[in-house]
Image (cartoon, helix red, strand yellow):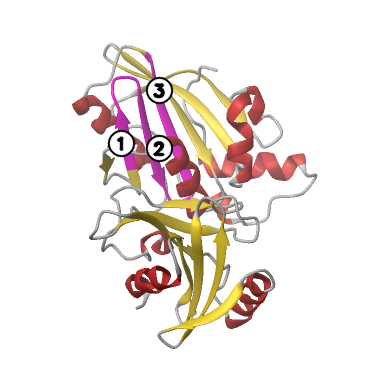
Amino acid sequence: MKTTRMSSAYVAIVGLALLLNLGCQPAGTESETASENFDIAGWTPTGEISSYDPNTLYEYINGAADSFLNYGFEGLEVQDYAKGNLVVTVGIYDMGNPLDAFGIYRTEAGDGASRLAIGGEAVLSLPYQALLVKERYYAKLETYEGEFDETSGEELLRAVAAGLPGIDGLPEIVQSLPLEGQVSGSIRYEKGGLFGLTEISNCVWAQYQSDGGEEYRAFRLVLDEGTEAEMDAAWTSLGEKWHLSEHAGYPILTREVPYSGVFGVMRTEHGIFGVADSADMEQVGTRFELLLP
């Protein structure tokens, strides 16, 4: 799996490969113009490039392939880079869009790691691994020879981020949940059923802690266009299984979930928000106060 230098724009390579596999002709897509040659400043590429698509990803990460595919994985290129006594394997995953890239990044980064404002965000797990998300790309850096320290790890992350196309920062919707009471670094994007509830999917969510020390989760449904029609459809679907009530003039749907307490979903002019893990309806209403604009 060792590599020379990433050829032309990573996206262009993957996009072209997928088009050819589908028997199509490439035609002026975003992937053809997304970036120039990928490069990591100060590092020397070694070996040959290994490339994977959705049909072959299991050859590289057999046990974890399904998780990537669930988040819309489109392509991967793997390249070794050397600097001094360090050799690092760099995997660049094209997840198709920034939200899916964020979703798989946070899934793999887990809780507790210190977040670095590099690219969209990065974590450094000394001495062997570093992870980075930037727009539609998720980068996984693992030492093959030698070990990272804090300085070399952050320098490499910054160099990889600079080599990827697009702008820094996280998707806007990821930052749409209120910060008050939010547990730092707990935001996730869940593409499938949220908290085991199949009727709720495509949500950003975060862990919260009340002034009294109680922990709960809050979430927001991600809608493709955010139109009234989409909200109507999502709300109607939930209403078939959940109980309708009201709080502060807004309609609320609630459901009692065994071992998890009362869940509530509120529709506002800004979107559909929810809270989980409440003891009763009164607590649902109190926690919704944080979500009201």
Q: Is residue 130 magenta?
A: yes
Q: Is residue 22 left or right of residue 160?
A: right
Residue 113 tag number: 1
Look at the picture and state if 54 lies above or below 245.
above
Q: Looking at the figure, which quarter contains the C terminus?
A: bottom left
Q: CA distance from mark 2 to mark 3?
A: 16 Å
The amino acid on which the numbered mark 3 sits, given as a three-letter code, is Glu
Q: Quadrant of residue 83?
A: top left
The amino acid on which the numbered mark 2 sits, given as a three-letter code, is Gly
The residue to which callout 2 is attached is 110
Extreme residue in the left direction: 151
The residue to which callout 3 is attached is 142
Residue 274 tag number: none
Instruction: Give 175 or 285, whichever is nearer the viewer.
Output: 285
Task: Please say if the residues under marks 1 and 2 sit with CB atoms less than 8 Å apart.
Answer: yes
Q: Position of residue 258 (x, y in %)?
A: 56, 53
